[in-house]
Image (cartoon, rainbow, N blue to C red):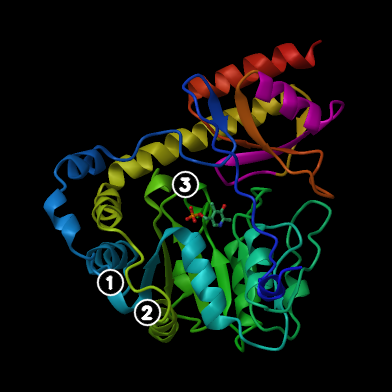
Amino acid sequence: MRTWEANIRNVEPYVPGEQPKGADLIKLNTNENPYPPSPSVEKALKELDYDQFRKYPDPKASDLVHVLSEYYGVGNDEVFVGVGSDDVIAMAFMTFFNSELPILFPDVSYSFYKVWAELFGIPYKTPVLQEDFTIRKEDYYKANGGIIFSNPNAPTGVLLPLDEVEAIIAHNQNSVVIIDEAYIDFGGESAVKLTRKYENLLVVQTFSKSRSLAGMRIGYAIGHPDLIRSIHDVKYSYNSYTMNMPSLILGREAVKDDNYFKECLDKIIKTREEAKKRLKDLGFSFPDSKANFIFAAHKEIKAEDIYKALREAHIFVRYFNLPRLDNYLRITIGTEEEMKQLFDFLEAFLSN
Ligand SMILES: *Cc1c(COP(=O)(O)O)cnc(C)c1O
C-alpha cells in the first residue's frame, strides 16, 4: 500500500438517482416536478446581465432570504439559504449535531442522513418504522444528540400529522430537531408555524421538488435567529459564496409567482390521487402518499422485474435494492400524459 493511502478518508457515498439522457424517455425516478418553473423565472433568465458574472454573488443572499422571509411571515434573521437542501442539511449536521449522544432518524428515510452522520463522525441510531411505515413518536422520547426526519417521509410518502411532529419537538427541547420538509407543499401542514414556539426547531425546505428548480440548487431553513446565526457561522467557515448569482435571482422570481406555484401543485395532487386509483386497480398496494411520488408494491410481480421492464420501455422509476424496500417502486408523479403512458405500459405488462 502506498503510504498516503493510509491517510485517505474512506466513505460510502450517497447514490443519487440516475439522470438518463435522451429525449424519448419518461423520467419518474427522482421526484422532479414535471412542469417547468414559473414564466417569470424564464423572463428573469433572459434578462440576466451576464456582465455581473465577473463579480462574486451576494454572500448573504439577501434578496432571496428576504422574499422567503416575507413569504413565511418570519424575519430575515430566521432564514438560511444554501445550495439545495442537501447543502443546508449537511451544514445543519455540522452545526448542531456535536453531542456524544446518538442522533436519531428513522431506519427507512432519506438515505443521505446516514451518509452525513458517517462523514462527520456523528453517532446515530435509527428507530425502526412501524409495519405500515409510520413513525412511532415515542421512539424519539429518549436521550439523543439531535433528531432529523423527513415529513412527508421519503421514500414512503407517509405524512406524520403536525400534532405528532410537535409532540416529538416538545419532548426534545434539549436537542435540535430538524424537520426535512422537501415534500410538504404536496399536501402536508408545515412545521414552520412552530419555529417561534420552539427555539430548537429547524425546518428545511427546497426549491427542487414543488418549485420546479432542482437544476438551480436552492434550499433553505427556517428557525430561531440563534440557530440561523450558528449555521451561518459554520457556512462562512467553509465556503462563503455558496449560491451562484443566477440561482439567487431565479429563485427569488419563483417565490414571487405564487399563483403559478399553487396551480402546479394542484395539478400534481390531482394526478397523484388519480394514480392511486389506477395503481389499486392494477393490484398495487402502497402507503397513502402526501408527496409527489407513490411507493408501491405489486401483489404478484416482483418490483425488480417491473422496474426492469419499465426501464426497457424507457420509463424510469426508482428501485431500492434494500431490505424492507426491495419489493417497492417509488414512482414520481409526472404529467397526466406521462402517467397515461406509464399505466398503458403497466396494464399491458401485468396482463401478460
Ligand atoms: C430531494 C430531497 C432532498 C434534497 O433536495 P435538494 O435538491 O438538495 O434540495 C432532501 N431531503 C429529501 C427527503 C429529499 O427527497
Q: Which residue is mark 1?
A: 59
**Marks 1 and 2 in Cβ contact (< 8 Å):** yes
The nearer-to-camera label among 1 and 3 is 1
Q: To which quarter of the image does residue 45 belong?
A: top left
Q: Quadrant of the N terminus?
A: bottom right
Q: Is residue 93 magenta-colored?
A: no
Place of residue 291 in the rendered image (x, y in percent of width and height, measured from the top left): 57, 46
Q: Is residue 163 above or below residue 223?
A: above
Using the numbered discs, state the Cα–Cα distance from disc 2 to disc 3 in whole angstroms: 27 Å
Q: Is residue 32 above or below residue 279?
A: below
> Ligand 1 closer than 8 Å to the CB at disc 3?
yes
Using the numbered discs, state the Cα–Cα distance from disc 1 to disc 3 in whole angstroms: 24 Å
What residue range appears in magenta? 288-312
Q: To which quarter of the image does residue 73 belong?
A: bottom left
x 45%, y 82%: residue: 227
Left or right: residue 197 compared with residue 251: right
Q: Is residue 60 above or below residue 302?
A: below
Place of residue 35 in the rendered image (x, y in percent of width and height, measured from the top left): 40, 34
Q: Which residue is mark 3?
A: 209
x 63%, y 44%: residue: 289
* Marker disc for residue 236: 2
Please state which amino acid type lies under the numbered disc 3: Lys
**Marks 2 and 3 in Cβ contact (< 8 Å):** no
Please state which amino acid type lies under the numbered disc 2: Tyr
